[in-house]
Image: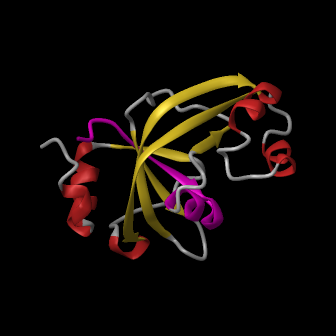
C-alpha cells in the first residue's frame, strides 16, 4: 500500500533500464526531505516519451561521498563512470535510492489535469494519487484507501 509518494523526472534511457531490471539504484544529487524507505516513486519520463511510465518502492537509501558512492552502486546504477562523474560534478555527496517492486505504468501527460512535470521531483498527495489511479488502474490496488 502507498502511504508516501513522490514523482521524479528521469531520462527515457534510465526509465527503460529500471523497467527491464538492469538499473536497481536511482541516483540523486539532492535527497528530498520527505522521502524514506518504502516511499513510492513514480517516474515521469521526459521527452520524447512524456509520461509516467513506472513506479517502484524505495528499498534502501545510501548517502556517501561521491567517490565512495560509486563503489557501492557502480554495478546497479545503469551508467558509466564518465556519466556518473558528469552528473555529480561539483557535488561532494550523493544519494542512491535502491529500487524494489517495479510496476509498469502508462499515464500520459495529456491525461493528467494541470500537471507540470517537475524539474527534479515533486511530492504527491493521496488525492493526487487517487486522481492518477483513475487513469491507471494498476495504481488503484496500491492505494491505502
- Let me know if residue 63 is in the magenta part: no
Q: Residue furthest top?
A: 64
- Residue 26, image x and y in percent? 59, 44
Can you say whether 25 is above or below 10 in the image?
Answer: above
* Left or right of 56 in this view: 45: right
Relative horizontal placement of residue 116, taking residue 138 as reference (left or right)? right
Residue 70, placed above or below residue 22: above
Residue 134: give x, y in percent of width and height: 20, 65
Foreground residue among 29 and 64: 64
Magenta span contains residue 14: yes
Q: Quadrant of the C terminus?
A: top left
Q: Position of residue 7 (x, y in %)?
A: 45, 49
Q: Which residue lies most toward the left here?
A: 145
Please, is residue 117 above or below residue 70 in the view?
A: below
In x, y percent, where is residue 38?
37, 33
Counting every numbered tag in the picture gives 0
Closer to the camera in the image, 28 or 109: 28
Quadrant containing the N terminus is top left
Name the residue: 54% across, 74% down: 49
Which residue range is magenta in the image?
A: 1-19
* Image coloring type: secondary structure
Q: Left or right? Give the position of 79 relative to 118.
A: right
Which residue is rendered at x = 85% and y = 39% of the image? 89
Q: Quadrant of residue 36?
A: top left
Residue depicted at 26% across the width and 69% down the height: 135
Amino acid at each position: 500500500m502507498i502511504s508516501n509518494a513522490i514523482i521524479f523526472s528521469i531520462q527515457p534511457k534510465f526509465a527503460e533500464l529500471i523497467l527491464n531490471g538492469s538499473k536497481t539504484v536511482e541516483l540523486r544529487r539532492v535527497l528530498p526531505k520527505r522521502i524514506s524507505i518504502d516511499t513510492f516513486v513514480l517516474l515521469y519520463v521526459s521527452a520524447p516519451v512524456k509520461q509516467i511510465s513506472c513506479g517502484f518502492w524505495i528499498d534502501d537509501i545510501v548517502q556517501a561521498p561521491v567517490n565512495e558512492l560509486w563503489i557501492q552502486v557502480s554495478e546497479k546504477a545503469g551508467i558509466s563512470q564518465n556519466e556518473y562523474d558528469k552528473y555529480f560534478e561539483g557535488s561532494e555527496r550523493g544519494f542512491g535510492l535502491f529500487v524494489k517492486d517495479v510496476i509498469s505504468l502508462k499515464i500520459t501527460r495529456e491525461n493528467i489535469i494541470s500537471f507540470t512535470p517537475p524539474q527534479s521531483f515533486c511530492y504527491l498527495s493521496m488525492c493526487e494519487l487517487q486522481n492518477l489511479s483513475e487513469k491507471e488502474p494498476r495504481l488503484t490496488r496500491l492505494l491505502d484507501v
